Image (cartoon, rainbow, N blue to C red):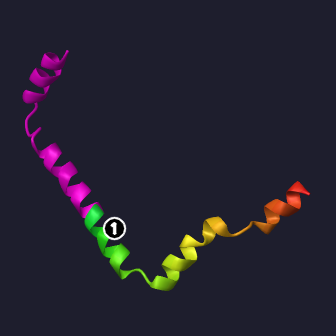
């Protein structure tokens, strides 16, 4: 089965560009994510980190 896929992929013109495009997308995504992490404000990070600890008052009212 793997020989069939390998032989089939080798017959496609320009198939080597797809791994390069996926690597480029991967690198750009994580570079942007890395940039965002270091430029995000401390207040925003603190606010977002406390979200799981807050109680949802609407949910508590519905269960009563």
Quarter assignment of residue 53:
bottom right
Magenta span contains residue 21:
yes
Give the farthest residue toward the top. Answer: 1
Q: Position of residue 11 (x, y in %)?
A: 7, 27
Query: In this picture, is 18 found above or below 8?
Result: below
The residue that mark 1 highlights is: 33
Residue range corresponding to the magenta coloring: 1-29
Q: Position of residue 63 (x, y in %)?
A: 87, 55
Query: In this picture, is 3 found above or below 37?
Result: above
Q: Position of residue 22 (x, y in %)?
A: 21, 49
Query: In this picture, is 11 found above or below 30?
Result: above
Quarter assignment of residue 40:
bottom left
> Image point 22% across, 59% down: which residue?
27
In terms of secondary structure, where does tag 1 sit? helix
Total labels: the figure holds 1
8 horizontally vs 39: left or right: left
> Image point 17% across, 44% down: which residue?
18
Mark 1 surroundings within 10 Å by alpha-carbon count, few (fewer than 14), some (14 through 19), many (20 or more): few
31 horizontally vs 5: left or right: right
Query: In this picture, is 19 found above or below 40?
Result: above
43 horizontally vs 12: left or right: right
Question: What secondary structure prevails in the magenta region?
Answer: helix
State which quarter of the image contains the C terminus: bottom right
> Image point 26% across, 67% down: which residue?
31
């Amino acid at each position: 089965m793997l020989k069939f896929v390998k032989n089939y992929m080798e017959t496609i013109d320009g198939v080597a560009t797809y791994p390069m495009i996926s690597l480029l997308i991967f690198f750009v995504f994580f570079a942007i994510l890395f940039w965002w992490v270091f430029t995000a404000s401390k207040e925003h990070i603190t606010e977002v980190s406390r979200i799981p600890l807050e109680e949802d008052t609407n949910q508590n009212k519905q269960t009563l």
